[in-house]
Image (cartoon, helix red, strand yellow):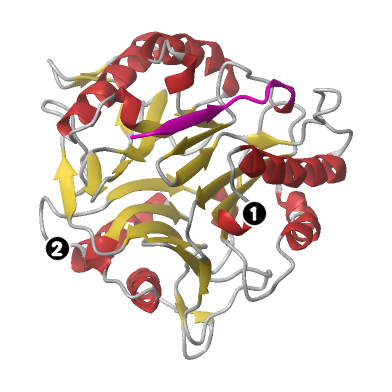
């Protein structure tokens, strides 16, 4: 599989990691921040950083031989809710056509010191972008419910609104079921089925709601060995709101889904360690569990070593290798773990031209996990 790594050191605080990776027709970005490419420094203030981040996203996809018309999904990471009011101005400058915008998800959690915004872009070459809607539902912001690019489908955030009223359904199980039904409706709008879904991120208001979510999950994906990869996050941003759950998914139309496991390592929930649809690969959380003992290591250093070892094993199970990894989302307790992450990442990917794009998040670690990897890539 042909690949291209793009380094733009003046746009990042971590020059050892590529700003973007193009693998086949797919492009994955690392964290795109508001660094001024003329000075290499973060922009002064939140508004300036938002403007620079979106400009840097445009420059990055151009460097990859693409245009902003190839961008199918953008995730906007903000440090606090006040950043939401700064998103749409640069968004509309880059995506002015109301009938032709990417899918978008905004996620709030603590960012590194001095950083007000990070973007992550997914783009597909040689494929026109087709916005998708669910009849009866709409976002308040200027974005579609999802977007289709070639045979790939990316959702914006999906909640438990009733399409008849565009209001959240009352009742925990009812809202969970409705959210999953809305996910089904969107992939069907793209011409697919739930069998085409390869990855689902679930954001929950409260851990006590997880059994209802799992019940809805099993209704939609009842067959062991034939489920999407999944990440579940307890999301404080939903506290005090009527919204109990938010979903975000990626689908590959017309490809058979296969599941993969690592012997001795697994999840308590009914999800696989990884899934492929055709050549596309997505993982669930890969943590620091020793495959020989089935036990989790106690220290960050050892958990990090084991997580990258488990990544290697999972990619082999899926018929690929570490060279097949195009993007890693790395979940941490806090950013003090960055040096440990980098040590293991550079040892695992010593060739800088074969390193994945990366995004670190101080969010979403369950239990005693100190690190968790989520991988996306392409296997032959």
Start and end of the magenta stretch? 1-10
Task: Please tell me how crowded label 2 is: few (under 14), some (14-19), or many (20+) other residues with Cα within 10 Å.
Answer: few
What residue did someone put label 1 on? 68
User: Residue 368 in the image: x percent, y percent?
Assistant: 36, 26
| Displayed quadrant of residue 197 | bottom left
- Residue in the image at 72% along x and 26% along y: 113
In screen coordinates, is 99 left or right of 359?
A: right
Q: Which mark is residue 200?
A: none
Residue at screen point 40% across, 42% down: 24
Q: Position of residue 334 (x, y in %)?
A: 56, 24
The answer to whether 115 is drawn above or below residue 187 in the figure is above
Precedes in sequence: disc 2 or disc 1: 1
Whole-number angstrom distance, CA of label 2 to CA of label 1: 38 Å
> Compared with residue 181, is residue 348 higher up or lower down, i.e. above or below?
above
Q: Residue at x 44, y 78 (%)?
A: 170
Which of these two is toward me, 145 or 173? 145
Q: Quadrant of residue 238?
A: bottom right
Residue 60: x %, y % from top left: 65, 39
- The 10 Å Cα crowd at callout 1, few under 14, some 14 to 19, many 20 or more, is some
Query: According to the image, label 2 marks what residue?
Result: 222
Left-right relation of 156 to 81 = left
């Amino acid at each position: 599989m042909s690949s291209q790594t793009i380094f733009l050191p003046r746009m990042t605080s971590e020059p050892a990691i590529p700003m973007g990776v193009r693998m086949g027709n797919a492009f994955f970005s690392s964290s795109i921040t508001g660094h001024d490419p003329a000075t290499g420094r973060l922009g002064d203030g939140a508004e300036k950083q938002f403007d620079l981040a979106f400009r840097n996203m445009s420059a990055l996809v151009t460097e990859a031989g693409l245009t902003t018309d190839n961008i199918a999904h953008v995730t906007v990471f903000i440090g606090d809710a006040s950043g939401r009011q700064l998103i749409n101005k640069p968004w509309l400058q880059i995506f002015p056509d109301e009938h032709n915008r990417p899918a978008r998800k905004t996620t709030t959690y603590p960012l590194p010191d001095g950083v007000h915004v990070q973007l992550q872009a997914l783009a597909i070459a040689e494929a026109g972008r087709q916005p998708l809607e669910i009849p009866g539902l709409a976002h308040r912001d200027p974005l579609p419910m999802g977007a289709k690019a070639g045979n790939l489908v990316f959702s914006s955030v999906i909640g438990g609104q009733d399409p008849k009223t565009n209001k959240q359904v009352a009742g925990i199980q009812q809202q969970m079921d409705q959210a999953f039904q809305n996910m089904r409706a969107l992939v069907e709008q793209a011409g697919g089925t739930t069998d085409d879904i390869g990855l689902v991120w679930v954001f929950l208001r409260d851990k006590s709601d997880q059994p209802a979510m799992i019940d809805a999950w099993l209704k939609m994906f009842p067959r062991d060995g034939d489920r999407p990869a999944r990440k579940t996050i307890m999301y404080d941003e939903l506290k005090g709101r009527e919204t109990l759950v938010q979903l975000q998914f990626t689908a590959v139309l017309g490809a058979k889904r296969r599941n993969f496991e690592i012997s001795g390592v697994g999840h308590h929930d009914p999800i696989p360690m990884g899934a492929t649809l055709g050549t596309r690969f997505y993982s669930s959380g890969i943590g620091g569990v020793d495959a020989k003992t089935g036990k989790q290591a106690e220290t960050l250093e050892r958990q990090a070593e084991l997580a990258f070892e488990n990544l290697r094993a999972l990619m082999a199970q899926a018929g690929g290798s570490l060279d097949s990894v195009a993007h890693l989302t790395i979940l941490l307790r806090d950013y003090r773990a960055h040096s440990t992450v980098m040590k293991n990442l550079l040892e695992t990917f010593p060739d800088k031209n074969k390193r994945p794009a990366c995004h670190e998040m101080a969010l979403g670690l369950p239990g005693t996990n100190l690190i968790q990897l989520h991988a996306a890539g392409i296997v032959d």
